[in-house]
Amino acid sequence: MDSVYEKHYDPMPVDLDPETDILKVHEDISREPSGILMEDVKENIESQMQEEEYMEELSPGGVLDEETISRGLSNLGRSAHGDHQVYLNVTIPGFSLTDVTLLGEYEYLQKVEIPYNDITDLSPLGKLHNLIILDASHNKIEKLLDFTPPFNLQEVNLSWNNISEMANLSSHRCLIKLDLSNNSISEISGLSQCMRLKYLSMAHNKISQIVGLDGLPIQYLNLSNNLIRMKESLENLKYLRELDLSGNIIRSLSGLQSNARLEFVDLEDNEVIDVADVDYLKHAKGLRELNLLRNPIQELPDYRLSVLHRLSCLTTLDRRPVKEDEKVAAVNMFDPPLDVVAARDHIMHVVYSFLQPSRVWDSTLPNVETPYPMLVLVGPQGSGKKDLAMKLVDEFGEYFGYGISHTTRRPRPDEISGKDYYFVSLEKFEMDIKMGQFVQTHQYNGNWYGLQMESIENVAREGLASVVHMELEGVLTLKKTYFEPRYVLVLPLNPEIHERRLHKRGFYTEDQINKSLKRVDVYVKQNQEHPGFFDMMICTDDLAAAYVQLRKIVMDYLGITGEVKREQQALNETREITPTNIRGRTWSKPSNSESQAQVRSAMNDVGSALVRGIVEEESIKRRQSAAKDVITGYVPPLYDQLMSRYPRTAPQATDKQDGLGQPVQSRAFSAPTYQNQEGKDLSEQGPPMSPDSSVDDESSSNLSDLDSATELHHGQNEDADLNYSRFLPTETLNPIFLMEDLSPRPPSAGRSEFKTHVQRPGSERHSVLPPIQPTAA
Ligand SMILES: Nc1ncnc2c1ncn2[C@@H]1O[C@H](COP(=O)(O)OP(=O)(O)OP(=O)(O)O)[C@@H](O)[C@H]1O
């Protein structure tokens, strides 16, 4: 037997030229290909022709005949009554049939597929009592199901026909699926009795209103490519799960708000313009897919995130799967959790302050372990926290100072700028934010509130702990900073008393009062869900009792008894309180029990008032080091600048503060005139870089504040300067000795005489803040 290769191989006709010994191809290359292949082709063509002839013979004139039917029959099975072996299906597509009368004789048929013909009349099918599925799509039918209804007809496909009007289908009660797409129907009607209808497609028609479907159990509705404006409600289509309304002229989605079972909505190519319309789909908790492609809404900024925020359950939007991070981004953009708001607030202030030239603050109290002593009273508006704060400052004036926030709110009649708040304009507030002056900010009732570093420093400079009051959001930001205050939750638990208090003040609108009352729950929730978030809680239903409680907490914590306090008062009356003679009190959390014990023991030692507290000792030590760095032009590595908890990136006051009783003098250029090694006056270049400077370039550090540094140095003679120059950051130094060498702080007028002969350390770099050596109490 010939192999396949041999059978199909048709060698080129070649001759060997005896002279040249070269193979030559035959001149006559146009000869027929091999006989076998030719035969195949011929066979093929013949069979095709035969087929066509045969087809032509079938159902001549478009009249269905036996032969055609017998060829289309399939699925041999039992008749409905079970007494006959019959074919159950017939498929006769594309025979240009016009007359299907003969089909009526096949009464056992359950499925009839006669698409792609020219049928206009389906009445013969009325005899098919067992018919369940009918596909007569792509025909020329003009009337809808105008035949005696088979008892169990469930699925009908009459798409791509010429139906312009719907008929009363009340007799087709078993219909489950009806496809009438691509006809020219202008109104939906006649379906009211089809109480099993689950699937209805009327796409590509001329429908302008979604009516006539009330109460039907439709789950899948396709009305795409019609003329629908969607003014009506689909409220009665309770079971709707998939809705295709693409290619219409829909502007608003109102009407879909009641379809809670929707899972898929296609609104591509419509006129939806407002992202708020998406809210109409909010009740559909199971909505997974939404398509709004080719709608004007797509042009809106942050469109995708905005939709995802409103419909958080979506898994696919505009045919694109929704990613997890998109969902997170959507929430963070449109409804950020309190913590995210606080983180952003914090980042903003850190970045702005970092962009500012840094300064060394004057106060000696803050240190790495207890950055700034601070007591924060937290609670909703009208909880009485401000009254408590003021009273605490009144009574314990030698321990606490009131940390005054800035606000854009208008002052009330009895309020004084610089006492209750610094009342500033919005422009000023924003400018201060940009100048990196704030530690935290928060918007409440349309007004901005914020605590500036300067306010805290003003209190700390007096050797006192700040008492501030704020809303929860402020605390969340504060918790992200290097401050570690004590937080006292001040909460009215009786809503009636709270409401009465708010009404009595007469400042608030009903909305504001309601908001304040509701916010109590936010605080309660925060307290319950984050144990330890607040250090203490005081109920302020009775303000007097609340103060007694707060007072006791404060005195216990500070370790003062009534007697000691009196002693201390007497002591204070007899001596001037300066930052150096106040001992190391703190209201912030010591980082470990040891240092807390040290603080307590130092504080209890009332008799030795001139002995410095540990807090101050450590603070002085660091100031010395920082001051030396400033003088020697040392720039800390970027990491140190960022990570150090010392307030090195504190904002620079470059402007007078509006509303301050005593305007803060500009500190930006307060550095003294000084000279470099060669004796050249550098004052034109500005002062040397502070240890906090965020700028690496020495020449650009012209805004450093050198108050501390100059205070340490000022007034020393040449010897003192030389003496100081010994204490480079590399050397271990007991700051007490250094302080004893220094004369008291001179008036600032003398600063201009300051000169330095200290060598710059060059590449020798050291940590700005040397580790704290444990000091004996
Ligand atoms: N820096 C701040 N950060 C966050 N919240 C602040 C800040 N300063 C003040 N707040 C709070 O903003 C809210 C509104 O301040 P406002 O001064 O208008 O309150 P109030 O009507 O006087 O009520 P209250 O007596 O509770 O302070 C108050 O709860 C207040 O504590």
Image (tube, rainbow, N blue to C red):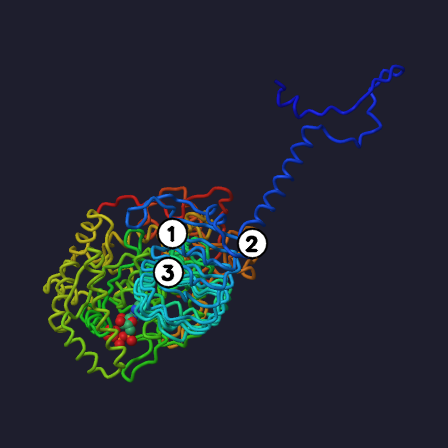
Where on the picture, by quarter, is residue 655?
Answer: bottom left
- Neighbor class of circle 3 (other Cα within 10 Å; few <14, some 14-19, many 20+) is some
Q: Is residue 49 above or below residue 390?
A: above
- Neighbor class of circle 2 (other Cα within 10 Å; few <14, some 14-19, many 20+) is some
Q: Amino acid at mark 1?
A: Leu
List the single residue furthest toward the right.
19
Callout 2–callout 1 Cβ contact below 8 Å: no
* Distance of label 3 from label 1 (alpha carbons): 23 Å
Whether residue 329 can be seen here:
yes
Q: At numbered mark 1, what does the secondary structure look like: helix, strand or loop?
A: loop
Q: At numbered mark 3, what does the secondary structure look like: helix, strand or loop?
A: strand
Image-based side of 163 in relation to 580, left or right = right
Residue at 27 percent of width and 68 percent of height: 470
Q: At numbered mark 2, what does the secondary structure look like: helix, strand or loop?
A: helix
Q: Which tag, 3 or 2, sits closer to the chain's start?
A: 2
Where on the picture, by quarter, is residue 534?
Answer: bottom left
Residue at 46 percent of width and 73 percent of height: 186
Q: Where is mark 2, residue-wise? A: 60
Q: Which tag, 3 or 1, sits closer to the chain's start?
A: 1
Does mark 3 have its CB less than 8 Å from ligand 1?
A: no
Q: Amino acid at mark 2?
A: Pro
* Distance of label 3 from label 2 (alpha carbons): 37 Å
Residue 624 lies, in percent from the top left, at 37, 51
Residue 440 lies, in percent from the top left, at 35, 64
Q: Which mark is residue 199?
A: 3
Q: Where is mark 1, residue-wise? A: 109
Instruction: Compare residues 30 and 420 and report the one nearer the observer.
Output: 30
Does mark 2 have its CB less than 8 Å from ligand 1?
A: no
Of tags 2 and 1, the one toward the viewer is 2
